[in-house]
């Protein structure tokens, strides 16, 4: 069986893979996308998209995402356990999508740009020295560059680093879709719940026909997450749900890779651990890192040197990890029990904390600015309490 020769092989057709494939194919490179699933395919995800995500999406794909947006909100409600702390209304837009539709849209965009696909088949062998990937059906894919965009349990990451998951740092998310039209139509704003588990939070996201309800947190601090989730669901919805519909997936909560690849093999998206541990934002970083990986390969290929892709990619990649490093620092303020108690007292005192949070996830302020704001606000509130 003959080899299939490409400039770049992209493993994984989610947002990071589709982004990279579109950037590369649009430049004129011969690109192959591999994925063990066929598309459209189901993907467990809250589906929150921000203005920041929209800016990155438009920059890469130059198209409207309106066909795959199910719901738009202009605010959010924040809770501690089941007590409303604060809310923002009539502020910046938050968008909600179904990942089946969203991912399929951008995969089709990459295909239209010229990317070829091998879907519905797994990888059998990975020969880095000969730049060859062997599929389960015996076909061999040969390429100068490889992009690992195959999720948190990445085959490419396992090949490079002998493992893809660090169980001491990995997060776990549990979700369920509830019929919004039958009994939950009154929940029109997204809801964030602190205090429902350790080093994590819960959420309720409105969609067109459903509510996506979930919790996510660092696994080692929450050994009984399924039970915690069922209690959370029962508190909010009084048993009006099917336990068997609960699904789970690992989340790289701030456990990003400092070295996202080796030579001409690059990791992006969840495969590189690019998920914000505070906001849960992953799609924007997936799109952005896929774009950066594609651009790095294009830059290297114009210099006729196939061994320096990582060096170029790393410079852009570190602009993402700088944000995640600051987010990891902020977790020390939000999630430990003592800090969480203080946060729950300070948060209701002013709407600006909630608004600044929306500014943060919209990309209008940095984590550094948000941290300085929180420290200043907490200090002023404590002084006010003591006076």
Image (cartoon, rainbow, N blue to C red):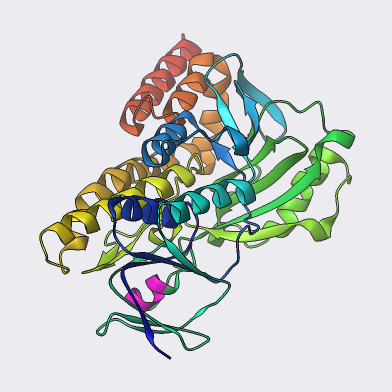
The secondary structure that most of the magenta stretch takes on is: helix
Is 117 left or right of 311, judged from the image as shown? right
**Vertical placement of residue 351 versus 33, above or below:** above
Is 275 left or right of 216, judged from the image as shown? left
Q: Residue at x 38, y 71 (%)?
A: 157
**Vertical placement of residue 189 versus 5, above or below:** above
Locate residue 179: give its quadrant: top right
Asked whether residue 149 is in view, the answer is yes
Image coordinates of residue 244 in percent, x first then y, are: 82, 61
Image coordinates of residue 31 in percent, x first then y, are: 36, 64
Is 248 left or right of 52, judged from the image as shown? right
Q: Residue at x 42, y 35 (%)?
A: 58
Asked whether residue 194 is in view, the answer is no
Task: Look at the image and give the residue range highlighted in magenta.
Answer: 156-161
293 drawn magenta: no
Residue closest to the eye, 105 or 87: 105
Image coordinates of residue 118 in percent, x first then y, are: 50, 71
Q: Residue at x 31, y 31 (%)?
A: 368
Judged from this view, the residue extending furthest toward the bottom is 1
Residue closest to the eye, 85 or 45: 45
Residue closest to the eye, 93 or 119: 119
Counting labels gives 0
Q: Residue at x 88, y 46 (%)?
A: 239
Residue closest to the eye, 5 or 96: 5
Quarter of the picture holding the N terminus: bottom left
Judged from this view, the residue extending furthest toward the top is 387
Image coordinates of residue 347 in percent, x first then y, are: 54, 23
């Amino acid at each position: 069986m003959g080899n299939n020769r490409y400039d770049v092989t992209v493993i994984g057709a989610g947002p990071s893979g589709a982004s990279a494939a579109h950037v590369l194919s649009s430049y004129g490179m011969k690109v192959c996308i591999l994925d063990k699933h066929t598309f459209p395919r189901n993907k467990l995800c809250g589906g929150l998209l921000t203005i920041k995500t929209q800016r990155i999406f438009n920059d890469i794909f130059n198209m409207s995402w309106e066909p795959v947006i199910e719901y738009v909100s202009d605010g959010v409600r924040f809770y501690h356990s089941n007590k409303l702390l604060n809310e923002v209304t009539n502020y910046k837009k938050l968008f909600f999508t179904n990942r089946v539709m969203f991912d399929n849209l951008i995969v089709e965009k990459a295909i239209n740009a010229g990317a070829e696909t091998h879907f519905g088949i797994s990888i059998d062998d990975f020969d880095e020295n000969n730049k060859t990937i062997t599929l389960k059906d015996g076909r061999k894919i040969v390429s100068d560059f490889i992009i690992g965009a195959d999720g948190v349990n990445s085959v490419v990451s396992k090949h490079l680093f002998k493992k893809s998951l660090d169980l001491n740092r990995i997060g776990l998310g549990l979700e369920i879709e509830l019929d919004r039209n039958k009994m939950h139509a009154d929940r029109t704003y997204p809801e964030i719940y602190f205090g429902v588990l350790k080093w994590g939070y819960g959420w309720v996201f409105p969609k067109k026909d459903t509510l996506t309800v979930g919790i996510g947190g660092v696994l080692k601090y929450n050994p009984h997450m399924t039970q915690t989730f069922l209690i959370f669901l029962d508190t909010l919805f009084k048993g009006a749900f099917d336990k068997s519909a609960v699904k789970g997936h690992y989340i790289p909560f701030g456990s990003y890779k400092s070295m996202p690849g080796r030579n001409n093999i690059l990791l992006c998206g969840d495969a590189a651990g690019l998920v914000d541990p505070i906001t849960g934002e992953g799609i924007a970083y997936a799109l952005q890192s896929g774009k950066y990986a594609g651009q790095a390969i294009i830059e290297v290929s114009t210099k006729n040197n196939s061994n320096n892709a990582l060096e170029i990619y790393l410079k852009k990649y570190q602009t993402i990890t700088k944000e995640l490093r600051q987010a990891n620092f902020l977790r020390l303020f939000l999630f430990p029990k003592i800090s969480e108690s203080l946060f729950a007292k300070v948060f209701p005192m002013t709407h600006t904390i909630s608004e600044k949070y929306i500014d943060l996830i919209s990309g209008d302020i940095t984590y550094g600015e948000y941290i300085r704001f929180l420290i200043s606000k907490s200090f002023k509130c404590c002084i006010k309490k003591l006076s």
